[in-house]
């Protein structure tokens, strides 16, 4: 199996190279930035790439962007994201083309070298491997999006105004409706978002957070 490794920390990058070599796999490129990663993926067309999401120079999403760009040129190029963080947005982007051959593993959950290599091999074979914590976050986001999708156009207007910090009276004035009507809309919003009386946190705050995140 021919592998490209993209990791900015020298010790981890070197450790991955040694681990893969010990299991009989060849690391054809080991790089520490997004530009070099894209160049290596297109030049080497490896059996799989192990990619840290955040790479120099900005430590934002350079690794992911390089992987996505490479998959546009080489459809279904196998990519395993190896990240320190649960970042559902990145997982969704990688899964979006539906081609498979993707994985997302958290660095601190890798505790067995042989098992990790089997995960890499599974992705290289066209499989999809997601860390359980990443799956949990994806499902939570899907449920939240579905709840927001159940709101009527008027309810979304009301929630948008709440997100701007408007009071019930302010919302009523903006929409030219009564405060009673606004209160009814807010009640419906709470119900559809699963925010019931007795919640430990302020329901208006939770509703606004759902709106902003969705």
Image (cartoon, helix red, strand yellow):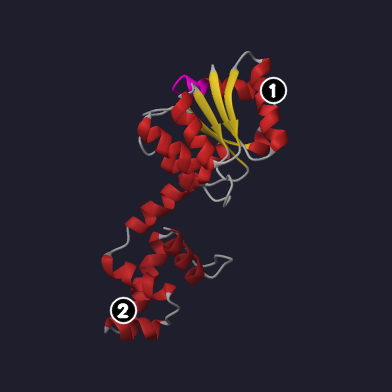
- Of the image marks 1 and 2, the number of the one nearer the N terminus: 1
Quarter of the image that includes the N terminus: top right
Tell me how far mark 1 sits from mark 2, CA to CA: 66 Å
- Residue in the image at 57% along x and 27% along y: 29
Q: Which residues are magenta?
A: 122-127
> In the drawing, what numbered circle is on residue 18?
1
- Give how far across and how far down residue 117 sits, in percent: 61, 21
- Residue in the image at 48% along x and 34% along y: 39
Q: Quick check: 174 above or below 37?
A: below
Label 2 sits on a secondary structure element that is: helix
| Number of the front mark, 1 or 2 | 1
Q: Depth check: 31 or 77 in front?
A: 31
Residue that numbered label 2 is attached to: 181
The crowd level at tag 2 (other Cα within 10 Å; few <14, some 14-19, many 20+) is few
Where residue 6 sits, quadrant-wise, is top right
Query: Which residue appears farthest toward the top when viewing the image?
Result: 24
Quarter of the image that includes the C terminus: bottom left
- Give how far across and how far down residue 138 sits, in percent: 47, 44
- Residue in the image at 59% along x and 66% along y: 200
- Give how far across and how far down residue 114 sits, in percent: 66, 20
Q: Quick check: 17 above or below 144?
A: above
User: Can residue 114 be seen here?
Assistant: yes
Where residue 184 sits, quadrant-wise, is bottom left
Q: Depth check: 187 or 117 in front?
A: 117
**Circles 1, 2 touching at the beta carbon (< 8 Å):** no
Q: Depth check: 5 or 183 in front?
A: 5
The crowd level at tag 1 (other Cα within 10 Å; few <14, some 14-19, many 20+) is some
């Amino acid at each position: 199996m021919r592998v490209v490794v993209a990791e900015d920390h020298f010790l981890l990058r070197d450790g991955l190279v040694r681990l893969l070599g010990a299991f009989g796999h060849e690391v054809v490129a080991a790089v520490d930035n997004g530009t070099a990663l894209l160049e290596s993926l297109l030049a080497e067309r490896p059996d799989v790439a192990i990619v840290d999401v955040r790479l120099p120079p900005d430590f934002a999403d350079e690794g992911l962007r390089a992987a996505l760009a490479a998959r546009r040129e080489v459809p279904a190029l196998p990519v395993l994201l190896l990240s320190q963080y649960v970042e559902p947005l990145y997982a969704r982007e990688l899964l979006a083309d539906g081609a498979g051959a993707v994985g997302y593993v958290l660095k601190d959950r890798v505790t067995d070298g042989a098992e990790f290599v089997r995960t890499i091999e599974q992705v290289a074979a066209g499989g999809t491997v997601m860390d359980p914590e990443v799956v949990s976050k994806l499902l939570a986001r899907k449920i939240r999006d579905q709840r927001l999708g159940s709101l009527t156009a008027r309810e979304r207007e009301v929630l948008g105004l709440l997100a701007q910090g408007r009071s019930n009276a302010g919302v009523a004035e903006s929409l030219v409706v009564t405060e009673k009507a606004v209160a009814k809309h807010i009640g419906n919003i709470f119900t559809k978002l699963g925010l019931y009386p007795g919640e430990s946190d302020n329901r208006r705050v939770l509703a606004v957070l759902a709106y902003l995140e969705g």
